[in-house]
Amino acid sequence: MDSLVIAFSYAWPFLVVLTVLVFVHELGHYMVARKFGVRVEVFSIGFGPEIFGWNDTHGTRWKISWIPLGGYVKFY
């Protein structure tokens, strides 16, 4: 049982740091696309079903999904 608690105590900080790194990485793709006039359909942190999201004034769907092991920017 102690090893399971230790594993989870390392997993949460790892996922938080990974999520921040993925966000910054994907934000770079988003910003370059917008600068060169490419429309962005979706900016997602995580994969799988959406937990929550919103649409901005440019028509981009920003969303957080259930599996926080990556992300993507979907272009038109």
Image: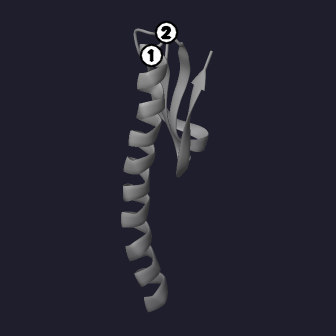
Please state which amino acid type lies under the numbered disc 1: Arg
Using the image, determine if residue 44 lies above or below residue 14: above
- Quarter of the image for the C terminus: give it: top right
Q: Position of residue 66 (x, y in %)?
A: 55, 47
Secondary structure under tag 1 reads: helix
Q: Are marks 1 and 2 in contact (CB under 8 Å)?
A: yes
Residue carrying label 2: 37
Can residue 1 be seen in this snapshot?
no
Q: How many discs appear?
A: 2
Q: CA distance from mark 1 to mark 2?
A: 5 Å
Q: Residues within 10 Å of mark 2 (few under 14, many from 20)?
A: few
Can residue 45 be seen in this snapshot?
yes
Secondary structure under tag 2 reads: loop
- Colour treatment of the image: one colour
Q: Residues within 10 Å of mark 1 (few under 14, many from 20)?
A: some
State the image quarter where residue 49 is shown.
top right
Please state which amino acid type lies under the numbered disc 2: Gly
Residue closest to the eye, 9 or 45: 45
Image check: 65 left or right of 35? right
Using the image, determine if residue 41 lies above or below residue 45: above
The image's mark for residue 34 is: 1
Q: Position of residue 62 (x, y in %)?
A: 46, 27
The residue drawn where x is 44% and y is 23% is 32
Q: Position of residue 10 (x, y in %)?
A: 40, 74
The residue drawn where x is 44% and y is 69% is 11
The residue drawn where x is 38% and y is 56% is 16
The image's mark for residue 66 is: none
Residue closest to the eye, 66 or 24: 24
Using the image, determine if residue 42 lies above or below residue 36: below
* Extreme-bottom residue of the structure: 2
